[in-house]
Image (cartoon, helix red, strand yellow):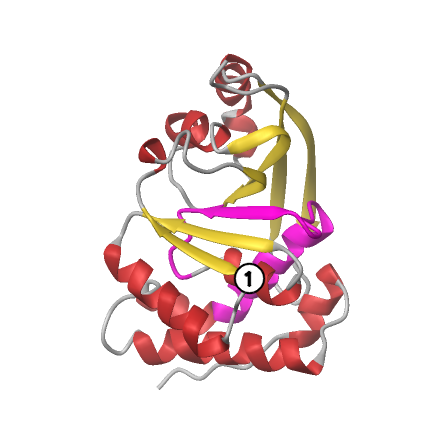
Amino acid sequence: MVDFSLPRQSIETVAGPLSDEQAVLLTGYGQAILKTSRQINVVSRQSLGSLGEHMVDSAAMLSFADPGQGSFGDLGSGAGFPGVVVAIMRPEASVTLVDSRRSKIVFLKDVKRRLGLENVTVIHGRLEELRGQVQFGLVAARALGNTKAVLGWCLRLVAPGGELVLFKGPLWTDEIEDVRVVAEQEGAEIARTRTIALPGLDRATTFVAFHVKHSTDE
């Protein structure tokens, strides 16, 4: 049976100190994924042994883009990475988890209830259905597949003046020009990028921030 041990030191290295309460909540979150995965695939089977890695990756975003007391949208949240981690580490932020898969929504609502995350809202829906219904000051998309295909829908859920953050790997530069064109069509631009080495892990994540200059509904 897979066990979960919170990589507290690695998380604190990339995102600052955790309170004991936050550490307990993150541990409970990891345990909830393992427990639920006995019945349904909350994450892929191969990911069950690397939940700590997903948490460190999620926390690393906070050293690149931090919602503070604002609104944060996690698009294609799945098991809740990075949204649940952000909600626990930034309880003053208003966090919305969005996913189109009912099984994931059931799980996310259960996590919200079980951990008492009052700053979390869970929305069941496809990105293209949410345009005009919700907007966030900061949006993240960690695992949405083809960037070029979904970028426009993601940007339309960012408030004017806000940012969309993508989690990318080492091949990011292969798609940068195509993505830049789509962003410009949506009234956005690549504002900054930063590659962050994940402590304790033999890999890094490149964070890419898109600044939305004006409303895409105009």
Classify residue 197 as left or right of residue 5: right
Which one is nearer the viewer's eye here, 208 or 217? Answer: 217
Residue drawn at the location 69% of the way across and 82% of the way down:
20
Residue nearest the viewer, comparing 183 with 110: 110
User: Picture quarter containing residue 18?
Assistant: bottom right
Q: Quadrant of the N terminus?
A: bottom left
Q: Please report the bounds of the magenta region as a residue range.
A: 51-79
**Residue 139: image x %, image y %?**
55, 41
Residue under the point 46% across and 33% down? 154
Instruction: Give the answer, above or below, for where 2 lies relative to 104.
Output: below
Label 1 Cα neighbours within 10 Å, binned few <14 / some 14-19 / many ≥20: some
Q: Which quadrant of the figure has residue 11?
A: bottom right
Q: Quadrant of residue 165?
A: top right
Question: Residue placed at 37% from the left, 27% from the top?
Answer: 149
Residue 168 can be seen, yes or no? no
Residue 43 or residue 201, whichever sits in front: 43
Q: Amino acid at mark 1?
A: Asn
Q: Which residue is mark 1?
A: 119
* Residue 64 highlighted magenta (yes or no): yes
Residue 192 drawn above or below residue 52: above
Of residues 142 and 97, the one drawn nearer to the viewer in this rendering: 97
Q: Secondary structure at mark 1?
A: loop
